[in-house]
Image (cartoon, helix red, strand yellow):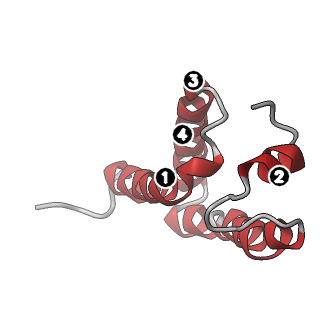
Amino acid sequence: MWRMDTFWFDVAIIMSMLAFGNILFGHFEEHRPKWRRVLKTILMLALFLTISATAGRAWALASLVLPLIAVLWIHLVYLPRHGVNGWTGEPKEKYYELIGAKK
């Protein structure tokens, strides 16, 4: 039987969140090299598992709230204030200029 008290459950949680995030918002990262996007996934997983192992799953899940609030604020407030659609990242030129990316 599958148990929720193993680290595999933690891996499933964070990887599911990262997968949905990449599916829905990956177009905001398409200017970044693939190795950097892979490294981000590995570091997020390592950080989440470290928090889960040391402080517990509740703290690990709670640690996801602050970045979630930041992402929501960026996409719902900051980007639209600067003339960029927070859902599509368009116009791309304005978005790249805003973040200082070279495209």
Q: Are marks 2 and 3 in contact (CB under 8 Å)?
A: no
Please state which of the two labelled residues, at mark 2 or mark 4, is closer to the viewer: 2
Point out the tag, 2 or 4, that comes first from the N-terminus.
4
CB contact under 8 Å: marks 1 and 2: no
- The foreground one among 55 and 26 is 26
Which quarter shows the N terminus?
bottom left
Disc number for residue 81: none
Quarter of the image where one finds residue 39: top right
Position of 82 relative to 53 (above/below): below
Q: How far is disc 4 from disc 1 in space, using C-alphas?
A: 7 Å
First in residue order: circle 1 vs circle 2: 1
Disc 1: which residue: 18
Would you say 82 lies left or right of 95 here?
Answer: right
Dot 1 falls on a residue whose secondary structure is helix
* Residue 96 relative to residue 10: left or right: right
Could you tell me how far apart the alpha carbons at marks 2 and 4 are, in whole angstroms? 27 Å
Residue linked to disc 2? 94
Which residue is tagged 3?
A: 35
Give the mark nearest the N terminus, 4 or 1.
1
Q: Could you say whether the residue bearing mark 3 is in a helix, strand or loop?
A: helix
Left or right for 95, reference 50: right
Vertical arrangement, residue 32 with respect to residue 9, above or below: above
Where is mark 4, residue-wise? 41
Query: Is 60 situated above or below 40?
Result: below
Tell which tag, 3 or 4, sits nearer the viewer: 3
Looking at the picture, which amino acid does disc 1 mark? Leu
Give the quarter of the image for residue 78.
bottom right
> Which label's residue is closer to the chain start, 3 or 1?
1
Helix or strand or loop: what does disc 4 sit on? helix
